[in-house]
Amino acid sequence: MSGSHSFPTLPSVLPSAPALQDVRTTPQQISAGLGRVTNPTETPIFICALSSCNRLFPSKDRLMVHRQNAHNSSEDNDIITWNE
């Protein structure tokens, strides 16, 4: 990483906290559906795992532009995806 970039990090174990009951969501909202099952062609995800970067991209082309700019690299290894 270059000097002026600072990325937030999380500890590997987060402190526990009590669960809170959802008192706002209605049964109608739950019945309407909050999400759906998808597949790799509908939801492309490419993760840069080079140097533990872990940034997400919608295409391999965008990831490779990121690698050139952020890592000064054109290597196409250390990519996590379900699309290929």
Image: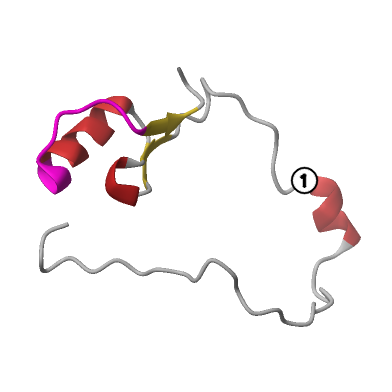
Task: Say above or below: 75 vs 56.
Answer: above
- Colouring convention used in this rendered image of the protein: secondary structure
Q: Which quadrant of the view contains residue 62?
A: top left
What segment carries the magenta color? 69-78
Question: Residue 30 at what x, y percent from top left?
Answer: 83, 54
Q: Residue at x 54, y 23 (%)?
A: 40
Query: Can residue 3 be found in the magenta stretch?
Result: no
Indicate left or right for 67 with 18 as reference.
Answer: left
**In the foreground, 24 or 58:** 58
Indicate left or right for 24 with 3 as reference.
Answer: right
Q: Residue at x 11, y 69 (%)?
A: 4
Which residue reaches farthest right? Answer: 27
Query: Can residue 73 be found in the magenta stretch?
Result: yes
Question: Residue 39 at what x, y percent from top left?
Answer: 60, 24
Indicate left or right for 67 with 37 as reference.
Answer: left
Q: Which quadrant of the view contains residue 57?
A: top left
Task: Say above or below: 72 vs 22.
Answer: above
Please tell me whether mark 1 sits on a helix, a strand or a loop. Answer: loop
Indicate left or right for 63 with 57 as reference.
Answer: left
Question: Residue 3 at what x, y percent from top left?
Answer: 10, 66
- Mark 1 lies on residue: 33
**In the foreground, 34 or 48:** 48
Task: Say above or below: 64 vs 2.
Answer: above
Q: Quadrant of the C terminus?
A: top left
Which amino acid does the dot numbered 1 rest on?
Answer: Gly
Q: Residues within 10 Å of mark 1 (few under 14, many from 20)?
A: few
Q: How many marks?
A: 1
Q: Residue at x 85, y 64 (%)?
A: 26
Q: Main secondary structure of the magenta part?
A: loop
Q: Which quadrant of the view contains residue 38?
A: top right
Q: Quadrant of the N terminus?
A: bottom left
